[in-house]
Structure formats: structure tokens, C-alpha cells
């Protein structure tokens, strides 16, 4: 008999709790088999968890109905971007909503929240704290700028909720740790961002005194759509594109970027390409460059090239 055939169908191909298996008639000796993985005390899985989400689903059988994944674990399950310094943390965060005891399992971090503060959504069959409440909870471990990146994702390309829902979540969590940081970040969250790089680029500019650019601006010339650019200063006809490594390694994206640049040039727009260095060690230099372009564009000196008649070589 195959090993899996010793288990009821309801337990196959999913994490399960030892207590449940015994109640379904599986012998304790079978549950001690090395063919099963023991990621957490009292649970078994059929394969070794490889990702943070796999670990979360491995501990899910231990959760009560009043418990849900939260904090950085909820962020990962919902696709909310986190800083790299948190990517190596394997601990699973679980919040108990109400007055009962927090989860106490090695490898997890248990939290508690009032019923009126935290709502629950579902990712597949897993209970997860609502994205808006997760935003407030992340304020305990993220910087303001990191939290803005998370907020832009929630109301932007992930489209989990609106800015208004974030505002109401901040109000519900009055008195919570990190609330001042959450409020500061909330004032900078904008819908329309499509990547963490775009958010960091926008923050780089406004932190250095530049006007706030428009996000994902459609450039239209003489009634004709030309291109959609990441950030734009339409009054000065300056467009800024954030180039991730994908633009360098993906041939199709590279060709598309070249075409966009030529089309913008045809309608007298400047296109500035920004990289990770421009929001890091070269941020001051990059901001100064944009400031010069804005000054020139606003003053009408958009194209300073000499416009003489071309002559053929003899």
C-alpha cells in the first residue's frame, strides 16, 4: 500500500494537524514517519515548505477561527512589497482578533488586536488581516518611505483598497504602535503608482524640493496619444521613466522603451531614464538634473540645439 493511501482523502496534498489526523483514524506511528515533514509542532506537511507563504499555510491548521495572518506575513500573502531586510525573516505573524490568547507556536509571532480594529479577508482558504489594517500594522517595522511604497501598492497596482479605506484604518487603530509613522506615510500615498521603483523615484524628487510629478501621465500632442510615462511634468514637457533590471534583460521591453523615447522626442518632450542608483547614491545629482530641465522647459528653452539648415557634404 502506498504511504499516502494510509490517510483519508481529506488529509492528502495539504498541511494538516496531528490531532485531526488521529481523529480521522490515522495511527500515531504513521504520523511519526520521516516521509512527513514537521514544519511546526503539531502539524505535518507532505513536502518541505519552500516559501514564506508555504510556511504560513503549514501553520494554518493550528489557527482558530479568531486568528488570521498579519503584519509582514499578510503583506507577503497579499503581494505587498517589503524591504529586502525583511525578506529573510521566516517567522510567521498571526493576530488573534478579540480577547483570547495569542498564538504560541515556535517559529511564529503572536499578536492580539481588538475586534473593532482588524478585519479579515481570505487568500484562498487562508484568513488574512485586511490590507488596510495590514498597512497600519506594518508601521511598527517599516520606515516612512518603505510604508509609502507599501501604501502605493495597496491603492495602486494591487488595487486592494482605496486611500479612504487606509484613512479609516488609521483612525480605527488609534493608540497603536507606529501610528505616527502610518499617518506620515499616508499623507504621501498616491493612487496610480505601478511599481516600488516609481514610488521611490517620486519620493526622491519631492524630498529634494521638486514639485510633485504626475503619475502615469498620458502624453497627447495635437489630439494624438503619444505615450504613457511613469512620472511627468507636463508644463515643462519632462517625462521620467524608472528602468528596472527587467528593462535591461527583456528584449521586448527594451525595444518598447526605445520606441517610446523616439515618439516623445518627436513632440518635443524630454525623456529622462532613472535607475536604482538615481534613487540611491546619485539621488542628489539626479534631482539637480531634473531641476535644470524644469527651469529650462518652463522658461521655454525646451530645445537648445542649434536649428540651422542642414548642408550636404561635398
Image (cartoon, rainbow, N blue to C red):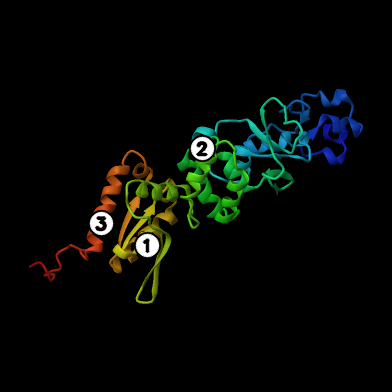
Q: Quadrant of residue 262?
A: bottom left
Q: Which residue is mark 2?
A: 142
Between the C-alphas of marks 1 and 3, the distance is 19 Å
Q: Which residue is mark 1?
A: 260
Who's the residue at 92% across and 32% down the image? 25
In the displayed structure, does residue 22 sit left or right of residue 283? right
x, y (%) of residue 43? 77, 30
Q: Which residue is mark 3?
A: 293
Q: Secondary structure at mark 1?
A: helix
In the displayed structure, does residue 91 sit left or right of residue 205? right
- Of the residues under marks 2 and 3, which one precedes in the sequence? 2
Between the C-alphas of marks 2 and 3, the distance is 33 Å
Between the C-alphas of marks 1 and 2, the distance is 35 Å
The one of 264 and 161 positioned closer to us in this rendering: 161
Farthest residue toward the bottom? 223
Question: Image height check: is 191 above or below 89?
Answer: below
Q: Is residue 305 visible?
A: yes
Amino acid at each position: 500500500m502506498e504511504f499516502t493511501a494510509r490517510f483519508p482523502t481529506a488529509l492528502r496534498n495539504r498541511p494538516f494537524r496531528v490531532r485531526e489526523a488521529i481523529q480521522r483514524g490515522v495511527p500515531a506511528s504513521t504520523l511519526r514517519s520521516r516521509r512527513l515533514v514537521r514544519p511546526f509542532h503539531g502539524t505535518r506537511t507532505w513536502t518541505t515548505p519552500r516559501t514564506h507563504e508555504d510556511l504560513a499555510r503549514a501553520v494554518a491548521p493550528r489557527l482558530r477561527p479568531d486568528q488570521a495572518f498579519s503584519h509582514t506575513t499578510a503583506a507577503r500573502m497579499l503581494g505587498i512589497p517589503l524591504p529586502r531586510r525583511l525578506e529573510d525573516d521566516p517567522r510567521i505573524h498571526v493576530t488573534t482578533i478579540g480577547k483570547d490568547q495569542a498564538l504560541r507556536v515556535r517559529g511564529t509571532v503572536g499578536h492580539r488586536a481588538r475586534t473593532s480594529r482588524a478585519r479579515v479577508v481570505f487568500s484562498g482558504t487562508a484568513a488574512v488581516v485586511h490590507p488596510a489594517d495590514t498597512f497600519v500594522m506594518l508601521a511598527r517595522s517599516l520606515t516612512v518611505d518603505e510604508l509609502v511604497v507599501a501604501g502605493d501598492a495597496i491603492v495602486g497596482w494591487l488595487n486592494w483598497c482605496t486611500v479612504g479605506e487606509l484613512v479609516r484604518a488609521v483612525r480605527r487603530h488609534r493608540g497603536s504602535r507606529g501610528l505616527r509613522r502610518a499617518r506620515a506615510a499616508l499623507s504621501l500615498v498616491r493612487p496610480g503608482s505601478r511599481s516600488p521603483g516609481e514610488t521611490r523615484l517620486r519620493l526622491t524628487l519631492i524630498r529634494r524640493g521638486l514639485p510633485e510629478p504626475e503619475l502615469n501621465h498620458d502624453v497627447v500632442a495635437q489630439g494624438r496619444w503619444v505615450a504613457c510615462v511613469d512620472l511627468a511634468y507636463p508644463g515643462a514637457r519632462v517625462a521620467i521613466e524608472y528602468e528596472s533590471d527587467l528593462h535591461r534583460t527583456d528584449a521586448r521591453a527594451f525595444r518598447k522603451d526605445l520606441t517610446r523615447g523616439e515618439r516623445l522626442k518627436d513632440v518635443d518632450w524630454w525623456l529622462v531614464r532613472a535607475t536604482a542608483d538615481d534613487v540611491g547614491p546619485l539621488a542628489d545629482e539626479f534631482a539637480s538634473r531634473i531641476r535644470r530641465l524644469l527651469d529650462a522647459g518652463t522658461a521655454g528653452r525646451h530645445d537648445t540645439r542649434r536649428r540651422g539648415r542642414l548642408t550636404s557634404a561635398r
